[in-house]
């Protein structure tokens, strides 16, 4: 079946560097995408979302880019901090059914 | 404003028993979703309730069931527990069905011995 997947299962960066987490999706009908952050032992926390009629959306220190041509989603974190260490999931929403399909997750580790 | 709450935080059961997990959505949210997250794995969609009705179901056996109450809170029941049911069970809520952000609770850690 169609799924959302992540290119890199782990990412290690130095504090202060920028981080980029990538995600590929296969359902061209998906019209809404969300990035979640999950710290150990906690539920996923909403970071930022983007709808399919947009290419880029910025939040506080985070930017999501959507490339519908190649069905690729990325999350950019500026000036990465130790508190950013977590697993990051991308999720896509199918128009018919209001269910999210999650990728496998990328473990981001920020080294001091 | 309170977020999504779940109870209990931890639950330990033995094989063959039944487990009941509870979720209270954010005030004003009518849709509730349940996900299973096995250790080290991603989130697998279980069930979606909206306005008291089951709207969609993931690829799980019938012993996973649930309901949504008039106040929009929800229960997830797992019958005839198996060892592989051990996981973090996450509940999420959204304002309405359709394209809308889902907000997650902290989860219930179910351990089946």
Image: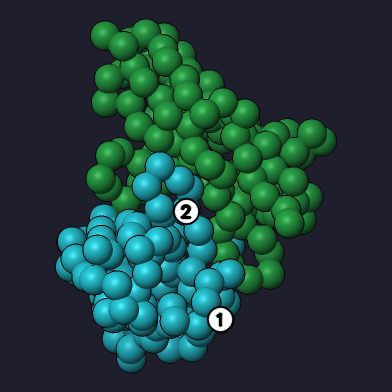
What is the x, y in percent for residue B83?
A: 35, 63
Residue B66 visible in the displayed image? yes
Q: Residue at x 18, y 61 (%)?
A: B10
Closer to us: B51 or B65: B65
Q: Secondary structure at mark 2?
A: strand
Instruction: Please provide percent x and percent y for residue B24.
Output: 27, 73
Quadrant of the image containing the N terminus of chain A: bottom right
Q: Which residue is mark 1?
A: B55
Question: Label for residue B43?
Answer: 2
In the image, which lettered chain appears green? A
Closer to the camera in the image, A46 or A87: A87
Q: In screen coordinates, is A56 left or right of A49? A: right
Q: Is residue A53 above or below residue B80?
A: above
Q: Determine the chain carrying the residue at label 2.
A: B
Q: How many marks?
A: 2
Residue B49 point in image, percent of width and height: 46, 79
Q: Quadrant of residue A72?
A: top right
Q: Colour of chain B?
A: cyan
In the rendering, which numbered label is found on residue A102?
Answer: none
Left/right of residue A89 with respect to residue B10 in the rendered view:
right
Mark 1: few/some/many CA within 10 Å (<14, 14-19, 20+): some
**Above-or-below relation of A96 to B103:** below
């Amino acid at each position: 079946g169609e799924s959302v997947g992540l290119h890199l299962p782990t990412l290690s960066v130095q504090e202060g560097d920028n981080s980029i987490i990538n995600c590929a999706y296969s359902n061209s009908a998906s019209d809404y995408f969300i990035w979640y952050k999950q710290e150990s032992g906690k539920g996923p926390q909403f970071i930022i979302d983007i709808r399919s009629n947009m290419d880029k959306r910025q939040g506080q220190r985070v930017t999501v880019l959507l490339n519908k041509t190649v069905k690729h989603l990325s999350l950019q974190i500026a000036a990465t901090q130790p508190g950013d260490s977590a697993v990051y999931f991308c999720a896509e929403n199918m128009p018919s059914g209001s269910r999210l399909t999650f990728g496998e997750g990328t473990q981001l580790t920020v080294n001091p | 404003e309170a977020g999504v709450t779940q109870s209990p935080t931890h639950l330990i059961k033995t094989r063959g028993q039944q487990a009941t997990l509870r979720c209270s959505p954010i005030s004003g949210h009518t849709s509730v979703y349940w996900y299973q997250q096995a250790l080290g794995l991603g989130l697998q969609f279980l069930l979606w309730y909206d306005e008291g009705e089951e709207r969609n179901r993931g690829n799980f056996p019938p012993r996973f069931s649930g309901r949504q109450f008039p106040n929009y809170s929800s229960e997830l029941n797992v019958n005839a527990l198996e060892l592989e049911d051990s996981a973090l069970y996450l509940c999420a809520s959204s304002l309405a069905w359709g394209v809308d952000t889902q907000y997650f609770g902290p989860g219930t850690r179910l351990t089946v011995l």
